[in-house]
Image: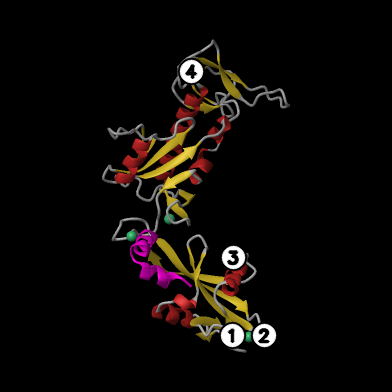
Amino acid sequence: MNEILYTIAKDSEGNLFTALSAPKGSEYYCVNCNNVLVLKKSGKTGPRTKRPHFAHKSVAPNCQPETALHFGFKTLAAEKLSQYLEAGATFNFNWRCGFCKDRHTGNYTKKLKSVRLEYDLKHCRPDIALLDENDEIFAAIEIVVTHKPSEHAVNYYLENKIILIQIDLKADDDIYLVEEKLTEPDLVKFCLNPKCNVCDNFQQKIIMSIVDGKCWNCYSPMKASVMKDGANKFLFGPEKFSPAEFTFAREKGVAISEYQSKITGEQYQANFCPKCGTFIRRYSKLLNYLSYAQEEALPNQDFIIRYNCSYCCEKKISDDPDWAQNLKW
Ligand SMILES: [Zn+2]
Ligand SMILES: [Zn+2]
Ligand SMILES: [Zn+2]
Ligand SMILES: [Zn+2]
């Protein structure tokens, strides 16, 4: 981490100013130790000039710029959320989900009725608490400069179904990126997928992708159906479709029929070309269609077919060898 400078201060009335927004000639005080700060803003640029910042007028050995940054960011973030709330506006944020590996988008203001700083939950004190109309906390925003939220707090949030949203600050000029950082938090411990009613874990999306490709043999247009997860990872082809999935794929114009290997005699359902009758065999051939679609070399359409609990699925496999056998190709 670069040296952290003081980029936030308050005036005599307690109003916050960043070093960039603070007018020269006013009195400023440290948000942390209340001592007098001097605004250092030369207007010059160059390798030796420091970015605009505040400095203590007299030495303040017990004051840490990290603490001031944490306080400043937290306060400005709460103000930003309140502004959106008052305006009745949508405030979206995005995250890569640790549960299902998919990317999700949430809206801070959807259930929001009030924003609280240092909200006392007895067991922990989130930096920013988001409360719903029943005055219940539904999300905790933690701003991390040096200290990550304790394991105790993380577990408390999980157990009480409070969404943990973590924002990591890496530099003092992150103070100018409050909205951006709220939009792309570093960690969100929450998944939008439905939970499994057996084990209560979040489930994974099973998506059918219909790829508008060409027959690899005669080059006439042909559609291929393939299953993938929320992170676009290949799962399986028609050889493992359920009857409802066959019907669905066929309704989307995919030709599927039984393929028989000339070498092994093995039979399974596969996508085929309606023009020349050539099959797209499973594994590598089918995987190619999916990867071309992902590289946007082929158009495709995705449909969420169902949700699957990978936790229960794995458990079943380890408890039952027959199950494991069935899942093999
Ligand atoms: Zn200070
Ligand atoms: Zn998820
Ligand atoms: Zn063909
Ligand atoms: Zn489950």
Spatial separation of the CA atoms under disc 3 and disc 2: 23 Å
Callout in the foreground (4, 3):
3
Q: Residues within 10 Å of mark 1 (few under 14, many from 20)?
A: many
Label 3 sits on residue: 294
Label 3 residue SS = helix
Which mark, residue 218?
A: 2
Q: Amino acid at mark 1?
A: Cys
Residue at 42%, 37% (x, y): give it.
142
Q: Earlier in the sequence, mark 2 or mark 1?
A: 2
> Does residue 128 appear to the left or right of 135 in the view shown?
right
In front of the other: 81 or 46: 46
Residue at 48%, 61% (x, y): give it.
230
Q: Amino acid at mark 4?
A: Cys
- What secondary structure is the magenta-colored segment mainly? helix
Label 4 sits on residue: 63
Q: Which residues are magenta?
A: 309-329
Circles 1 and 3 in contact, beta carbons < 8 Å: no
Q: Earlier in the sequence, mark 1 or mark 3?
A: 1
Q: Earlier in the sequence, mark 1 or mark 4?
A: 4
Is label 4 within 8 A of ligand 1 (CB to nearest ligand atom)?
yes
Circles 4 and 3 in contact, beta carbons < 8 Å: no
Circles 2 and 1 in contact, beta carbons < 8 Å: yes
Q: Quadrant of the N terminus?
A: top right
> Does residue 72 appear to the left or right of 125 in the view shown?
right
Q: Is residue 327 magenta?
A: yes
Is label 3 within 8 A of ligand 2 (CB to nearest ligand atom)?
no
